[in-house]
Amino acid sequence: MGKGKRSRKQMAAADEDDIHDLSSEDEDYSYEDDVSDNDTSLQGNISGRRGQYSKRKSRNVDSIPLMEGEGRSLRVLGFNQAQRSLFLQTLNRYGFQNYDWKEYLPRLKGKSVEEIQRYAELVMAHLLEEINDSECFSDGVPKEGMRTDDTLVRIANISLIEEKVAAMEQGKITKLFPNYLKYEFQGLSGGRIWKTEHDLLLLKGIIKHGYARWQYISDDRENGLFEAARRELNLLLMN
């Protein structure tokens, strides 16, 4: 319960993974066109002249080169440095989302579904490569600090959550946790207020707001989790 209130933008910045030095020196890059100012931790006022990459939804994705430019102006399948970092950040929050890209499009403004799909296929191909000490993947694309193992584990966790929620909603399973887990971790059986239905709502909150975005999940009063957690922990009601 901190001593002061934080703005939504501050919570978003604190909640997202840290991103450093994401501004692009490419004069064609337009921050306003490419990056949503809602729900991102990119800092600073990055401006640029609108160019060939600002509005490119009608461009044939097959004509986009694998790489062009160099240094901080490098583009990979048309994605500049900031966009690549935002893509990876979103991937670690939402997974591949059955490839509908609904969480990617608002963050990668100016990119079409086809462009995001093609870049996602490239990222997956990179994730499946054998881990080594090279600074680049086999196709020459820089790794840029991508933690392959961590990313694969995160995608797998998100996929398991999606499968568990879908199975519960379809009636394929009636319990979130098998009995042996409840026996080993008795807290999974529920608390005084918090029950299995709240665990399911929590999983749905992760799918909706993103993996580990607890502040956003808590702020969502529609799911009822905040009140259940408050009563479970005997916290005072505050405005």
Image: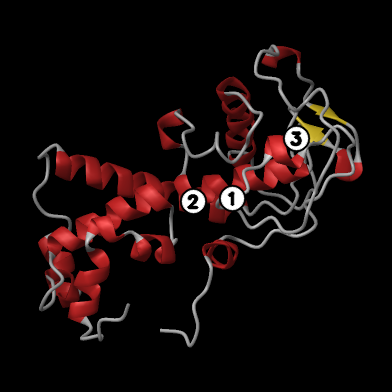
The image position of residue 14, as x and y in percent, is: 57, 68
Colouring style: secondary structure
How far apart are the two marked residues, 1 and 3, measured between alpha carbons? 22 Å
Residue type at tag 1: Gln
Instruction: Specify the quadrant of the image occupied by residue 125.
Output: top right
Q: Is residue 132 above or below residue 18?
A: above
Q: Is residue 110 visible?
A: yes
Picture residue at 57% right of the left edge, 60% below the top: 16
Please give left or right for residue 29 compared with residue 113 in the image.
right
Residue topped by disc 2: 93
Q: Secondary structure at mark 2?
A: helix
Residue at the farthest front position: 239
Q: Secondary structure at mark 3?
A: loop
Foreground disc of the pair 2, 3:
2
User: Is there a contact, CB below 8 Å, between mark 1 and mark 3?
Assistant: no
Q: Which mark is residue 89?
A: 1
Q: Quadrant of the N terminus?
A: bottom left
Picture residue at 19% right of the left edge, 71% below the top: 228
The image position of residue 21, as x and y in percent, is: 80, 57
Q: How many marks?
A: 3
Precedes in sequence: disc 1 or disc 3: 1
Residue type at tag 3: Ser
Q: Is residue 7 above or below residue 206?
A: below
How far apart are the two marked residues, 2 and 3, measured between alpha carbons? 26 Å
